Image (tube, helix red, strand yellow):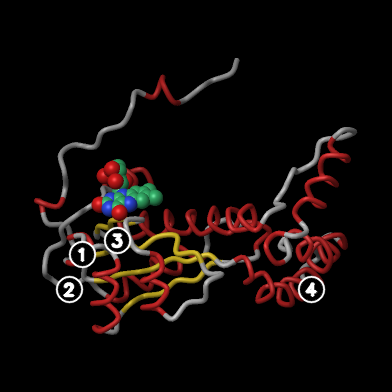
Amino acid sequence: MDFFEAVQRRRSVRKFKPELFPDAHVRQALTAATKAPNSSNTQTWDFYWVKNPDIKKKMVSACLSQSAARTAAHLVVVTANPKNWRRSQKPLVEWAKTSKAHPRVVEYYEKLVPLMYTAGILSVFAPLKWLIFFVIGLFRPIMRGPATRRDIQEVAIKSAALACENFVLAISALGGATCMMEGFDEWRVRRALGLSYSTRVVMVIGVGYPDEAGIWGPQFRLPEAEVVHVLD
Ligand SMILES: Cc1cc2nc3c(=O)[nH]c(=O)nc-3n(C[C@H](O)[C@H](O)[C@H](O)COP(=O)(O)O)c2cc1C
């Protein structure tokens, strides 16, 4: 299936058929998810494919018993944790040293990435970071963040959301259907999966074959002219 067909085919499906959806397809889509572009390639995301029936039951309840979760053949949870930069730092430095990357890339991963991902407890360093960005920004263009813990989470969440999109498009290309869900109790999802409080639950994705009743009418979008702005 070509890319545009997969995009056209994808709809949010709120009810799935009871038949099994192949594990191999989920695996392939997870691989596609991990290929998503992500901030500084720090890959601060994680993917939890919930197979355990007890955990799945808890997940359905944490997803407010939405039918998209209840009827899904598979549930995949995508999380973001900025602290995961530590997991990637050493392999990224190794990669930079062995892959003819510019020498500044090594320095970037060794020095700048730790600074970028540090806000201190209760964002104590944030005002200082903000002031530095502000003063430098008076003289030249500069990225004005991330400064606060929230800003840093946002960076990780953006990347994880891109992985979600890769995942759902891959499932679509493989003939399946999905529903991305942010309608969940994050605290209960963390508890069901045994996750730390620094982990943000970005999306729970239901996967399966679509039941016709699970598609709520034709796709609605605002006219392109209202949202696409061409600046000539
Ligand atoms: C961030 C995000 C959160 C969503 N949360 C839910 C949800 O909790 N439950 C649900 O049924 N659909 C959810 N959706 C699906 C949207 O409602 C859906 O994408 C939108 O209505 C457009 O429909 P379409 O995906 O079929 O084009 C979510 C989608 C996104 C991107």
Q: Residue at x 18, y 62 (%)?
A: 209
If you read the primary sequence from the N terminus, does the residue marked by circle 1 or circle 3 appear first?
A: 1
The quarter of the rendered structure image containing the C terminus is top right
- Does 83 appear above or below 173? below
Between the C-alphas of marks 2 and 1, the distance is: 20 Å
Indicate if the residue with disc 4 has its beta carbon within 8 Å of ligand 1.
no
| Disc ID at residue 98 | 4
- Which dot, 3 or 2, sits closer to the camera? 2
Q: Which residue is mark 1?
A: 65
Inspect this view and state whether residue 94 appears: yes
If you read the primary sequence from the N terminus, does the residue marked by circle 4 or circle 3 appear first?
A: 4
Q: Which residue is mark 3?
A: 174
Q: Which residue is mark 2?
A: 20
Between the C-alphas of marks 4 and 2, the distance is: 43 Å
Q: Tag 2: residue type?
A: Leu
Between the C-alphas of marks 1 and 3, the distance is: 26 Å
Q: Is residue 23 left or right of residue 199?
A: left
If you read the primary sequence from the N terminus, does the residue marked by circle 3 or circle 2 appear first?
A: 2
Say which quarter of the image contains residue 188. bottom left
Q: Tag 3: residue type?
A: Leu
Nearer to me, 46 or 198: 198
